[in-house]
Image (cartoon, rainbow, N blue to C red):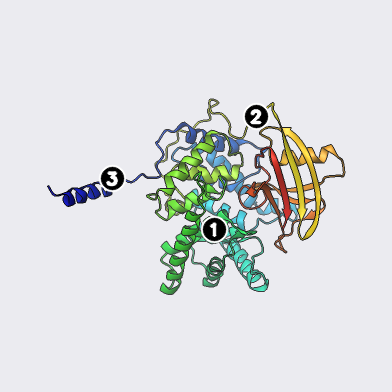
Amino acid sequence: MEPRMLQLLFVLYVLALPVQLCEIPRGNPLIKCLNMELLSLSQDLSEELNPSVYVALRLSADHSLEKEAQYLQRLKNVFQPSASSSIADGQQKQPNTGRLALYLLALRAACQDMETLLERQLVTRLKHHLHKEKEQIAFRRNGRPITSYYQYSLGVLALCVHGKKIDSHVIQKLLNAEQHNKFMHGSKLSVDTTAMAGLAFACLKQANLYEPKLVAAISLAVQRVTNRILQAQTSKGTFGNIFSSPLAMQLLIATGMSKKPVCPKGMDALLGSLEQGHFQNPMIMSQLLPVLDGKSYLDIATMECRAEQDTLELDTKCPGSRTVILGTKMITVQLAVEHPPNPETLYNHSIQVPSGSSLQDVLRTAAEQGPGQFTFETQNTLHGPFLTAVMGVKASNGERRYWQLLQAPDTSLQKGEGNSVWGTVQSGTLRGQCV
C-alpha cells in the first residue's frame, strides 16, 4: 500500500474518534449530595426563600415531591399573598424584576396553570417591569436599566420560557446592549450577565413567535455571546471565575456546545471546586445543579411533571459544602481601599485572619481592630451579602458606581451578579476600589 493511502486512512481514523461530551456519570455522589443540600436549604426556615433553589430541585432527576411542594407553597405565600394578608401587612414590598422572573420560572418548573387570574397578573406585572426597565434604558445617558442587564435578561428569559410573546422593543434593547458591549463589570466582561443574556436569546430563537428579521438578529446575538463565553475560559477551565461558570455552562448546554473540548474541561473545574467545598452561596449552588444533570433553564419550558422519581431523602453522610472549617494557620492580608481618581489610599493595613476566611471575615476583623478606623456596609440579597459602602463611600446603582474587589494583582473576588462578599481570600494584598 502506498504511503499516501496509509496517511489518508490514519486521518480518517482520527476523525472517527468519539468526541468527549459534557457528561457526568449517573450516581456521582457529589451531585447527589449537592441535590440533598439544596433540599435541606428548602426546609431551613432561617434561610431566605429563593425561587432559584426550587427551580434547581425541579430540574433534578431525583425528587422529594412532598418537600418540594411545601417549599413551593412557602414561595407562593410570599410572592402571591392572599388579599387578607396583603391588607394586614400594609405596604408589602414588591419583588424586583429578577426575583419576580425567578418566581415565574419556579411556577413553570412546577407545571402550574398560568391561565388563572392571579398567574396572568404575575405575567402582566413582569411585562410592566420590563417596560419600565426599557424606558429607563432610553432615558439614561449611559443606556442602563433600572436594575441591571442581568435582571433584564432574566425577565426576558422567564417570559420566553412561559411561551409569552415579548414586546419587540424590549428585545431590541437587549440586542442593542449586546452589540454595544454593555455586559461589562468595570473594564471586564461580566460572564454572569453575558450568559444570562445568551440564555434569553437562545430561548427567543427557539420561540417561533417573531418576524424573520428579528429572529436573524437574535441568532447572530446567540453566536456572539457564546463566542464571548468561550473566549472567557481560563487555563483552569473556569469561565471568568469559578462562581460565574455554572451559568456559562448552562449557556453552552442550551446552545448545543457540549461537544466542544471546552465543555468537559469546564465540567471538571466545577466538580473539582464542588469537591473542595468552594460553593457556599445557595444561588450559585442552584445554578450549578442543573449543569451537573446536563440541563439549563431552557429545559424548564418542556417540563411535564409526570413520572418523576420521588426517591430523594436527606442523608447525613453528605458533608455540607456550606460548612466552612477555618484553619488553625493564620494568614496576613494587606487590605487597601482606594477611591480613584483620589490619589490617596483611604485605608491600608495588615489584617490577620485564619486560613479559609471569607472576604467578609477580613472586613469584620478590620472593623473590630480599630473602631472607627475602618467601616463597611453590606446588603443581603439572594446572591449573598453585597458590599455597598466602604469608609463612608457608597456604591450607587443609579450612577453605576460600585466597589471592585481584587486579590492582587487583579484577581476578582466577586461571586455571581455584583459585589458579593462570600469569596475566600488568601494571604497577600486585597484591594477595594470604588469605580
Q: In the displayed structure, would residue 172 be above or below residue 300?
A: below
Residue 302 spot, x, y in % from top left: 42, 53
Going by the numbered disc 1, the residue's amino acid type is Thr
The answer to whether any part of residue 117 appears in the image is no
The C terminus: image quadrant: bottom right
Q: In the displayed structure, would residue 75 be above or below residue 214?
A: above
The answer to whether any part of residue 226 appears in the image is yes
Q: Residue at x 43, y 40 (%)?
A: 61
Q: Whole-Å distance between the Cαs marked 2 and 1?
A: 33 Å
Q: Which residue is mark 3?
A: 17
Labels 1 and 3: the sequence-earlier one: 3
Going by the numbered disc 2, the residue's amino acid type is Ile
Q: Whole-Å distance between the Cαs marked 1 and 3?
A: 33 Å
Labels 3 and 2: the sequence-earlier one: 3
Crowding at dot 3, Cα within 10 Å, few <14 / some 14-19 / many 20+, comes out as: few
Q: Describe residue 87's horizontal placement relative to residue 321 as left or right.
A: right
Going by the numbered disc 3, the residue's amino acid type is Leu
Q: Which mark is residue 325?
A: 2
Q: Describe residue 342's horizontal placement relative to residue 329 as left or right.
A: right
Residue 210 spot, x, y in % from top left: 44, 70
Q: Whole-Å distance between the Cαs marked 3 and 2?
A: 44 Å
Outermost residue toward the front in this view: 3
Q: Which mark is residue 194?
A: 1
Q: In the displayed structure, would residue 281 be above or below residue 326?
A: below
